[in-house]
Image (tube, rainbow, N blue to C red):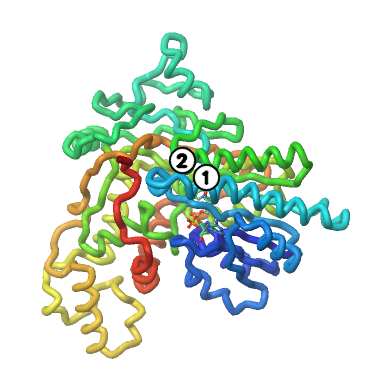
């Protein structure tokens, strides 16, 4: 099978291409504009493979897309190219409207024109798989929420009971914290001390996915950010092309991904790299936002399963059954780093032995070279003479405007219909991820040398 993959130089797209080249006989053409988020170094292990090729174009350029379809004659499209960072969408929504809506429209039209030229058997077998996010559904009730009576609180009921009303919140089972930021209008002015206090109060509350609702494929769309609204729009376009033109589409909506090669503006790599650099670890608001984390390699297996076995026109939710508060995620990363790369109590000048986990690619070098490089590494990362836990670096910052409080996926459809389940637990996936960032600091340095300077985005003015 010949696959046209858009956004293949990004985090998930590159994982998908590495998976396809390693585990299938498929041929892949990667179409990517190479924005700040696209990095061909994530594809080094497949770049010489004769089944892989790359074309640098913008998915909004119709003529260039037509040329790619004519040249490569794909059997299916997997459309991942997107502007994907919520904070960036708050600072500059135009790029999100252009890439995610206009770009998806342009992809649909170019693919449909090509599809119409195919002989009947290839036309029937053709698929356009649109990769989307669970953020299109808005947010879900949170364990900290006040219980909602849908009959006496119609405004709240519209927001909370409409989208997923299968399971009501059971007030006695979830602690109610008075100072918790309101679910509908998270305020950007949450101050650090209040946020910290709230976190301390809620630290023992665990997500109750057994009693709180989950996103299903039938959940109504209620996007909160320019990013999620643009992705929701693109999902609607894809469904319209199915219904209007009989164009054979598939949609998947996935929860938060994490794993190797993720650009360090997203929570997990940002925390790992900031911690290693001895920088503060920013937590938005109270840090009690809940996300359902999925290891990226589980996601790409799910995507391929849907492409091969999914029912034309169907939507599949993909999730990891890993509901975690952001603060829990950050503390888990700190605990792994404390174990693998303890914040040492000696200065760089005193080092005679490399620390476990640092620059493991240096192990082939002479002891002297290793020590010199380790000192440089420590100085670069500013971690010499630092003691204590990485948790000491945690700091609370103003929340993101409109920040969704809880996402959680019901992935039972893909599990029952297509037999997919995640292989990694959050503990195993997170440990692999931290180790990958420790082993691949050159990749990290290079992506950080680019336009991204780890600045705080998405605060609005
Ligand atoms: N990361 C997640 O947690 C997550 C979760 C669910 C769904 N998704 C969706 O999966 C897809 C991939 O996400 P990601 O995290 O890998 O994103 P990413 O930002 O890492 O990668 C996006 C890729 O798209 C490319 N791109 C951007 N604009 C383009 C354009 N106009 N033309 C061509 N290429 C362009 C970039 O160069 C980059 O390689 C997105 O559609 C996203 O909405 C992501």
Q: Residue at x 87, y 57 (%)?
A: 119
* Residue found 63% across the figure and 38% down from its top: 236
Image spot of residue 405 (x, y percent): 38, 35
Mark 2, other Cα within 10 Å: few <14 / some 14–19 / many ≥20: many
Q: Earlier in the sequence, mark 1 or mark 2?
A: 1
379 left or right of 420 in image: left
Nearer-the-camera pick, 150 or 324: 150
Q: Report whether residue 281 is seen.
A: yes
Task: Name the residue rendered at 29%, 73% in the picture.
Answer: 358
Q: Which mark is residue 226?
A: 2
Q: Which residue is mark 1?
A: 97
Q: Is residue 98 above or below residue 49?
A: above
Q: Between label 1 and label 2, give the one nearer the viewer.
A: 1
Query: Which residue in the rendered view is the most extreme toward the right?
Result: 120
Which residue reaches farthest top? 152
Q: Is mark 1 within 8 Å of ligand 1?
A: no
Please tell me whether mark 2 sits on a helix, a strand or a loop: helix
291 up-or-down from 295: above or below: above
Give the residue displayed 19% in from the left and 73% down from the top: 379
- Asked which secondary structure carries label 1, the reply is helix
Q: Is there a contact, CB below 8 Å, between mark 1 and mark 2?
A: yes
Dividing the image into 4 quarters, which one contains the C terminus?
A: top left
Q: Is residue 242 left or right of residue 78?
A: right
Q: Can residue 16 be seen?
A: no
């Amino acid at each position: 099978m010949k696959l046209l993959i858009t956004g293949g130089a990004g985090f998930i797209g590159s994982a998908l291409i590495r998976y396809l080249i390693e585990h299938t006989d498929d041929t892949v053409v990667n179409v990517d504009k190479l924005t700040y988020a696209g990095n061909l170094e994530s594809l080094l292990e497949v770049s010489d493979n004769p089944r892989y090729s790359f074309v640098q174009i913008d998915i909004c350029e119709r003529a260039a897309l037509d040329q790619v379809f004519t040249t490569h004659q794909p059997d299916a499209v997997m459309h991942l190219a997107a502007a994907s960072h919520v904070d960036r969408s708050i600072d500059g929504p135009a790029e999100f409207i252009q890439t995610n809506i206009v770009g998806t429209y342009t992809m649909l039209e170019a693919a449909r024109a090509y599809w119409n030229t195919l002989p009947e058997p290839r036309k029937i077998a053709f698929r356009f798989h649109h990769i989307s996010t669970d953020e299109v559904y808005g947010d879900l009730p949170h364990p900290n929420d006040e219980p909602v009576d849908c009959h006496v609180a119609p405004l709240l009921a519209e927001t909370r009971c409409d989208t997923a009303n299968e399971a009501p919140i059971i007030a006695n089972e979830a602690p109610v914290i008075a100072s918790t930021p309101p679910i509908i209008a998270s305020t950007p002015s949450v101050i650090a001390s209040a946020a910290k206090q709230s976190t301390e109060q809620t630290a023992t509350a665990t997500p109750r996915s057994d009693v709180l609702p989950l996103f299903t494929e039938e959940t109504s769309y209620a996007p909160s950010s320019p990013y999620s609204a643009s992705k929701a729009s693109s999902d609607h376009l894809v469904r319209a092309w199915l219904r209007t033109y009989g164009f054979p589409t598939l949609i998947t909506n996935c929860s938060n991904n994490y794993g190797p090669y993720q650009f360090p503006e997203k929570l997990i790599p940002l925390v790992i790299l900031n911690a290693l650099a001895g920088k503060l670890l920013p937590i938005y608001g109270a840090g009690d936002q809940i996300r359902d984390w999925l290891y990226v390699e589980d996601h790409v297996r799910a995507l391929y399963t849907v492409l091969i076995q999914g029912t034309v026109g169907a939507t599949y939710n993909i999730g990891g059954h890993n509901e975690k508060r952001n603060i829990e995620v950050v503390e888990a990363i700190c605990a792994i780093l404390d174990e693998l790369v303890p914040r040492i109590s000696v200065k760089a000048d005193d080092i005679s032995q490399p620390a476990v986990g640092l620059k493991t690619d240096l192990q082939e070098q002479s002891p002297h070279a290793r020590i010199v490089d380790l000192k440089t590494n420590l100085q670069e990362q500013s971690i010499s003479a630092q003691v204590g836990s990485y948790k000491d670096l945690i700091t609370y910052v103003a929340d993101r405007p409109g920040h969704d409080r809880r996402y959680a996926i019901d992935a039972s459809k893909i599990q029952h219909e297509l037999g997919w389940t995640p292989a990694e637990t959050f503990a195993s996936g997170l440990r692999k991820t931290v180790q990958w960032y420790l082993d691949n600091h050159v990749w990290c340095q290079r992506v950080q040398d680019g336009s991204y300077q780890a600045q705080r985005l998405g605060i609005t003015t």
